[in-house]
Image: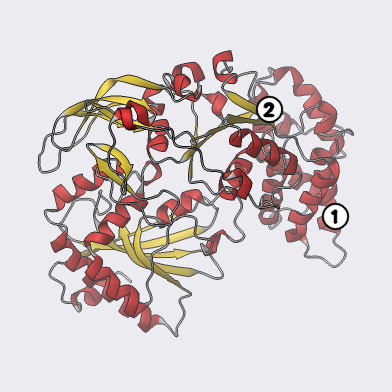
Amino acid sequence: MNAELPAFLAGLETKRQFSWAFGERELPTGVPSRFLDLFPDGVVQKHDSFGIVYVRLWLVGLNPTRLMIGIFLGAERAQQSEPRRAATYIRNRLESLIDPLERERGFAYQVWGNPDIWWADDAPGSVRAVTRQLEQFITFKVTDPDENNVDEIEADIGELVMAVDAAIDRLQPIREFGKNILLLYYGENLPPAPVGDGFGEMAVVDGNTASAHEEHPKPEEMEVTPEPDWFTSLPAIPNLGDLRGMQDAYEKVVAALAAGKHVLLMGAPGVGKTELAEAVCRQIPQPYDVVTATSDWTSVHTIGGYMPVPIAGSDAEPLDFIPGVFTEAMAANKWLVIDEMNRADIDKAFGEMFTLLGGKRKSIMLPYRKRQSDGSYRRVVLGMANTQEAESHVYALDPSWRLIGTINTFDKASLFQMSFAFSRRVAVIEIAIPNESDYRAIIETAAAVLDNDQDNTFHDAIVGLLVAIFAIEGGAGLGALGLRVGPAIPLDIIRFIDRMRRFEDDPATLVLTALESYLFPQFEGRHEQTADIAAGLAAALGLQALPSDSMARLRTFTGAME
């Protein structure tokens, strides 16, 4: 391909020379992917810099391998940004280039949440990280490449390259344009949100985000906006995906959210806490962000703080207030799902958010100032609409905004504790491990991938071992130890065994090998229970004792000394 690209690109007679770069990565859903990027040479040093558009050919999956081809928006911090808004902004700038491509050659633009994201059908876990990369496409289409459509694909690539070549003229000067996109990603100069994507039409008024169709009222004219009555319009039978036995927990969660409370989901690892939180948001439906808490979190990560930010049309990069994950979610009215919340020091990291989480239309003034489009600075205020003042840059908190956190009960004794100040601001809902019958059904359904012999001997052996370890509430497995975990872990083990059996065919050996990688890490810090854990797992596997190598790996995680 390296030898063919120069001749192909030269034959397009573009104004600029184009370079290319190959890459590959495994998507968050576990699907392998490779990509080829074609970008204008010499415009910037790095082709994926902010605001640069280029052509991406993305091969995803194996048997079948599908090709997604389109114009891509460069964004180095896509995981922490709003690519949809930036992509919409650029599409508006390039409307006369993009529209003909979409009408004449079948390209299209899909926003986050589109159910036709084809590689999500059988993929385990959430596809949110994949869809964030989808949002960076300005336009694209998907095809199954074969010898019959090579010419059509080549013609599409040529059209896209020429469109990007023409786009660079409209996006010049490119450095200033890239800086504008950087500001877009940080929440400034936001263009109207896509119609019908759940965000509503937004505009920037005096440096603050407000409804595009409303005038900017004075503080004394502000009225309390009633919360949307989404609760009464929930589907009678919720779609909880692969989650089983979650109906009771789902009902408690939506009732607490509708009653005005933030929610904290507590449960064993792998029980489906984060999946349930996302399923709830989808049922409402409500746009949301998911972040994972860490022990390094401070109020700068959650609320925001000063960072150097370039000024459009200048080389200067003065300090400016950059919002944190809470503030960004509030400004976009996207609910925030915080995974593994007790990994953060909540009192330190949440800072001023404690006041806002208490409700009652409160507001707080931060010790920061935000640069406005005219170069002036305004003090930063978080809170309700009645705090709108001429001297303030307000990150408004809609009354309907909610926080959903998750806590792993295996970690709660060894990590940061919840303070009373936080716990009284949330409804704590325990997510129970599925009962033995549901758990067994989950394992048996997933283990269907192991059916490859006439009498199902291998399949039945694996299912029997996993049921004994994970599903039975008493017995010799984790249930007897009071350490049962959720089904996500045995499901990971089944997928691992399906691949590992190429190298090993003994069921007990395969299960033990998988336990070392997927279950043992969950016992971190449980050094006093090391002997009981080892004895219980050995009994469930039909062994007298765990092999010495396995014991050594278990001690590595529990911290037990020889």
- The answer to whether residue 29 is above or below residue 95 is above
Q: Quick check: 215 left or right of 118? A: left
> Depth check: 365 or 211 in front?
211
- The residue most toward the bottom is 148
- The residue located at (40%, 44%) in the rendering is 79
User: Disc 2 marks which residue?
Assistant: 523
> Depth check: 52 or 353 in front?
353
- The answer to whether residue 413 is above or below residue 151 is above
Q: Quarter of the image containing the N terminus? A: bottom left
Pointer 2: residues within 10 angstroms few (<14), some, or many (20+)? many
Disc 1 marks which amino acid? Asp
- The residue located at (63%, 33%) in the rendering is 256
Q: Would you say residue 323 is visible in this rendering?
A: no
- What label sits on residue 121 in the rendered view? none
**Dots 1, 2 in contact, CB < 8 A:** no
Disc 2 marks which amino acid? Phe
Q: Would you say residue 93 is visible in this rendering?
A: yes
Q: Quick check: 492 left or right of 12? A: right
User: Disc 1 marks which residue?
Assistant: 460
- The residue most toward the right is 475
- The residue located at (42%, 22%) in the rendering is 362
- The percent position of residue 435, horizontal first and vertical second, equals 82, 40
- The percent position of residue 164, horizontal first and vertical second, equals 23, 66
- The answer to whether residue 201 is above or below residue 15 is above
> Depth check: 47 or 513 in front?
47
Per the image, label 1 sits on a secondary structure element best described as: helix
Q: Quarter of the image containing the C terminus? A: top right
